[in-house]
Amino acid sequence: MKSTTVLTATFAVVLTTTAARALVNPLLQPIHLYDRYNVVLAATVVSADLTNENEDVESGRVTLKVSTVCKGVFGAKEIVINVPAKKDRGEPEHDANDEWNIWDAAVKGRTFVAFVGKKRRRGADKVLLYCGEQQWHHARMADKAKPSVWTYESASAQVMVGTFNGASSRLADMLADAANGTAFFPAVPTVRLNRDVIVGKLPGGSGGVALFDVDGDGDLDVLACSAKGIRAFLQEGPMRFSDATAKLGLSGVSGVSCALADVNDDGRSDLLVDNQLFLKTARGFLKTKTPVSTQDKPLRVSSFVEINGDGNPDILLSHVGGGLTALLADGKGGFTDATEQLGLAADECGPGGNGYFAPGEWNGDGRTDLYYATGRGLILVQDAKGRFSPFKHKLAFD
């Protein structure tokens, strides 16, 4: 009996929930807050001055420097948050302790994101502050004639989870994108998927899938992988796909993963299927010389990754029991095995590993780092010389 896998595309609709700690809490998602408040801004902590350090009092003043006004009009360049003594704040009791402390959040240089003045009449003086690490704090404008002087009220029992729960500086970036109309972050939460659209069928179990504008008509097309043969489906109309595998020169090609990037700087996106490279031509894809690798283990996954900062799409491969292999691109379609040069063959970098990987920027130095899902999980950080080594951590990736 011939095995086939039906490939479907799934679209999302929005459901809402009012639970404070639900998986996705729409009441605390960035795009909703952006709409609900008159002014949205980002500011950095200049100073945090405790006038009374007694832990039962902890009163003082936090000064912020306004860096970005993402929405509305806010003329002041500096914000002062007066923090009354604990007994005068009326803060609710929380199970947590230090994480609710405004003084822990008010670290010099930290970004605060502020949502100022709810649109509804009774909330015109309200200020909601996000300080990172899921921390929310409430304040208010004590005098509307002095909109840059706020009085701290309390920490919130709610946390922001689901769509966004990261650093406050990243939230500031996201809201600036929203203001500029360049937002790409999925800021509206989704908790249910529906409307499955059948794209086509594969000759075997499905592996990697790529969505990309293959034919340059402005619509996303689908490349789907199978060990028994890959398939290319072009979107010829809104959600109408046709099998263009033969037309694109990909008949008989098989593999479990795929990726696209312009490897020879001709303006066309080329195709990587496992360790097979296909150059894009005016008519379709043309198989070229397979990038040289000394690895003889079965492939787990491969992808284009910009590893060494030269702007060229390099190739990273994970092999079953063979660890990671790195092929550096020369920008003309050629590749060189640089696994040992980059330190990825070292014992501490999991050379006998058997997992998937994800590139990213871990420590803020501008260089590509890697997460390698082998063992308990390796975070491989790249140093100034271009060599990778594991970052010691206590995160429970397993």
Image: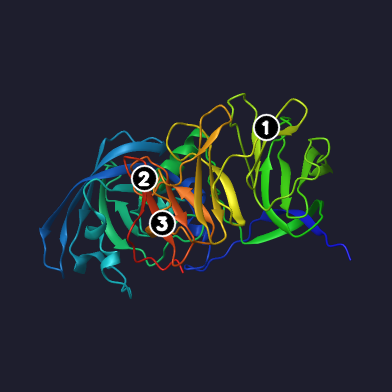
- Front-most of residues 141 and 101: 101
Are circles 2 and 1 on residues that touch, CB within 8 Å? no
In the rendered structure, find residue 279 and report the number of the disc placed on it: 1
User: How dense is the environment of label 2, judged by Cα within 10 Å: few (below 14), some, or many (20 and up)?
Assistant: some
Q: Which residue is mark 2?
A: 387
Residue at screen point 34% across, 62% down: 393
Q: Quadrant of residue 287?
A: top right
Mark 3: secondary structure: helix
Mark 2: secondary structure: loop
For marks 2 and 3 on the same chain, the one whose residue lies earlier in the sequence? 3
> From the image, which quarter does the N terminus lie in?
bottom right
Mark-to-mark CA distance, 2 and 1: 30 Å
- Front-most of residues 292 and 27: 292
For marks 2 and 1 on the same chain, the one whose residue lies earlier in the sequence? 1
Q: Is residue 127 visible?
A: no
Amino acid at dot 2: Arg
Amino acid at dot 3: Cys
Give left or right: position of 165 versus 8. left
In the rendered structure, find residue 264 and report the number of the disc placed on it: none
Q: Is residue 260 above or below residue 398?
A: above
Q: Which residue is mark 3?
A: 349
Residue at screen point 21% across, 48% down: 108
Q: Is residue 380 visible?
A: yes
Residue 32, position as x, y percentages in the image: 51, 51
Mark 1: secondary structure: strand
Mark-to-mark CA distance, 2 and 3: 11 Å
Farthest residue, direction right: 1
- Front-most of residues 353 and 25: 353
Mark-to-mark CA distance, 3 and 1: 32 Å
